[in-house]
């Protein structure tokens, strides 16, 4: 087995976690391949006699690793999407960040998770991605997102006007700060923060959530994920912000936006004793007595 390590920053508080993970993999004769910019953060956790390989891009891990361990928060997993692309490499999220809906393995259970990986006692959960038609290659070939596509005003001066069509039928014209088109995975991210509902990861749906709509009766809409969504942006300003997860560009309002589901998935490794409902109860503090 070959396991890739990926992360963006790694503080000394988690050195013991890393040493334990490396030791368990080494004892099981698992080869470790480390993202080179991340390697400097964890060098002190690696035995100087331990041999490992480095990688820097998608081409260097495709067909070269069996799974990826992402050390960080949900943002780190989102940043791994351009590395994983359509390779199908499954990802285990070890949470050294904050909330952790995607990076769901907490530090205290990381060793147990690695033991489950070694013994094959885990499941793989397929997560839908959403993509934008990108004939002009403004996203450098990575025109898809795991959480959401966001269309927002660029400046604070005025609202943008967003016409949304579902399979060529007009859904609504939004006067708002913008809209979010979220996957089930993204329903617990930006969309949730502006009042969108939570969807289970296996829902065959996408979610359209307005951001600060001028008309207070406008509400989020759930649509089938086989739909094709077309968006036209109007308003006083010529430019708007177009985001795919954390990757954001400035686009001209003449830019044609067509959105649909990708024909591949992002595969998340899931421990056998974890489920989505337990995760949201813990992360959102549902059922807690807030009087104490």
Image: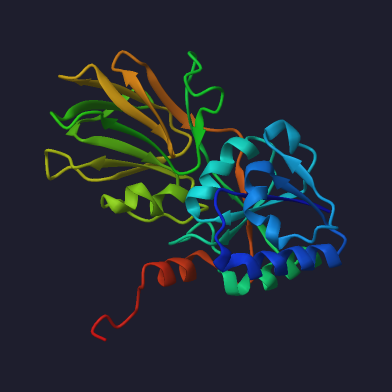
Which is nearer the eye, 130 or 63? 63
Q: How is the image coloured?
A: rainbow
Query: Relative to residue 105, is residue 187 drawn left or right?
Result: left
Please tell me whether residue 140 is drawn above or below residue 10 in the rendered image: above
193 relative position to 186: left or right = left
Residue sitting at the far right: 29
Q: Say above or below: 218 vs 283.
A: above
Percent position of residue 86, x then y: 65, 35
Count numbered badges in the picture. Answer: 0
Residue 137 point in image, percent of width and height: 51, 17
Quarter of the picture containing the C terminus is bottom left
In this rendering, would 143 be left or right of 231?
A: right
Residue at 33% over, 39% down: 180
Quarter of the picture containing the N terminus is: bottom right
Q: Is residue 274 visible?
A: no
Residue 228 image point, x, y percent: 43, 28
Quadrant for residue 16, please give it. Answer: bottom right
* Nearer to us in this view, 150 or 6: 6
- The one of 179 and 204 positioned closer to us in this rendering: 179
Residue situated furthest bottom in the rendering:
292
Is residue 132 among what the camera can see? yes
Classify residue 241 by image quadrant. Answer: top left
Residue in view at x 28 percent, y 24 percent: 240
At 34% from the left and 78% from the top, the residue drawn is 287
> What percent of the width, then of the height, locates residue 146?
50, 42
């Amino acid at each position: 087995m070959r396991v890739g390590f990926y992360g963006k920053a790694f503080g000394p508080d988690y050195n013991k976690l890393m040493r334990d993970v490396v030791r368990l993999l080494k004892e099981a004769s698992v080869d470790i391949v480390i993202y080179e910019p991340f390697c400097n953060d964890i060098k002190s956790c690696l035995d100087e006699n331990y041999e490992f390989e480095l990688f820097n891009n998608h081409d260097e891990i495709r067909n070269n690793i069996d799974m990826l361990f992402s050390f960080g928060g949900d943002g780190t997993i989102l940043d791994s999407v351009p590395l994983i692309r359509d390779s199908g490499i499954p990802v285990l999220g070890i949470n050294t960040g904050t909330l952790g809906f995607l990076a769901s393995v907490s530090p205290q259970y990381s060793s147990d998770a690695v033991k489950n990986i070694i013994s094959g006692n885990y499941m793989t959960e397929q997560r839908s991605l959403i993509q934008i038609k990108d004939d002009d290659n403004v996203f450098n070939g990575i025109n898809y997102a795991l959480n959401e596509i966001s269309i927002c005003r660029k400046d604070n001066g005025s609202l943008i006007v967003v016409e949304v069509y579902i399979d060529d039928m007009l859904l609504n014209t939004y006067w708002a700060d913008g809209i979010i088109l979220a996957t089930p995975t993204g329903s617990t991210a930006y969309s949730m923060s502006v009042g969108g509902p939570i969807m289970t990861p296996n829902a065959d749906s996408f979610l359209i959530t307005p951001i600060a709509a001028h008309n207070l009766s406008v509400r989020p809409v759930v649509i089938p994920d086989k739909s094709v969504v077309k968006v036209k942006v109007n308003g006083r300003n010529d430019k708007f912000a177009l985001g795919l997860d954390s990757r954001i560009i400035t686009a001209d309002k003449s830019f044609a936006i067509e959105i649909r589901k990708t024909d591949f998935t992002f595969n998340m490794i899931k421990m056998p004793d974890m489920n989505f409902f337990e995760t949201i109860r813990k992360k959102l503090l549902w059922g807690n007595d807030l009087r104490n």
